[in-house]
Image (tube, helix red, strand yellow):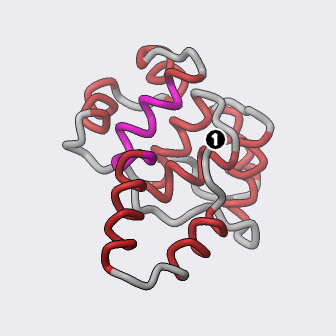
Amino acid sequence: MTDKTGDLMNKLTSTDSLEELDKYLEELRDKYPKTLKEYLDTVFSSKGMSKVDVIAGSGIDRTYFYQIMDGSKNPGKDKIVAIALACKMTITECQRALEIAGEGILYPKNRRDSLIIYAVSNKMEVRDLNVELEKYGLPQLA
């Protein structure tokens, strides 16, 4: 079971010594994925998805996908969303992947992000999301 962010924040802000901080940071290191690759591997495994399945569903070039997975390429928001859609991530999983990658999370006050949130929440295909984005005159996933 994962800790809630609020609980972690309370624990961290109540830490009053460097020794406690060191213990907290050690727990984080052992408990949470540090890289996008680690996170995606965990998600793919939990969903029974192979990398080949994700490549096919995301529309991402095979070589580029494997460069993402070996850490030599840092994907942008659109590529992460395409991967999220391909492996049917929940919105929470998608937002977490975006956070780990250092990309901005999806923002419901943004029209394009709202369509993406809808697509992820409703397990849409990448091509179907792109049709909807085009319909509203918004940039398709790159």
* Residue at left offset 50%, top offset 21%: 45
Question: Viewed as shown, does residue 122 lie left or right of 90?
Answer: right
Residue at the extreme bottom of the image, as rendered: 16
The picture places residue 71, in percent across and down from the top left corner, at 24, 42
Q: Quadrant of the N terminus?
A: top right
Is residue 39 inside the magenta stretch?
Answer: yes
Residue 10 placement: quadrant: bottom right
In front here: 105 or 19? Answer: 19
Is residue 48 inside the magenta stretch?
Answer: no
Question: Viewed as shown, does residue 36 lie left or right of 77?
Answer: left
Residue at the extreme left of the image, as rendered: 72
The picture places residue 104, in percent across and down from the top left corner, at 51, 66
Examine the residues drawn in magenta and state their main secondary structure.
helix
Residue carrying label 1: 1
Question: What is the tally of numbered marks visible in this picture?
Answer: 1
* Residue at left offset 47%, top offset 30%: 42
The picture places residue 119, in percent across and down from the top left corner, at 74, 42
| As drawn, 23 above or below 15 | above
The amino acid marked with disc number 1 is Met
Mark 1 residue crowding within 10 angstroms, few (<14) / some (14–19) / many (20+): few
Query: From which residue to which does the magenta span run?
Result: 31-44
* Residue at left offset 78%, top offset 48%: 118
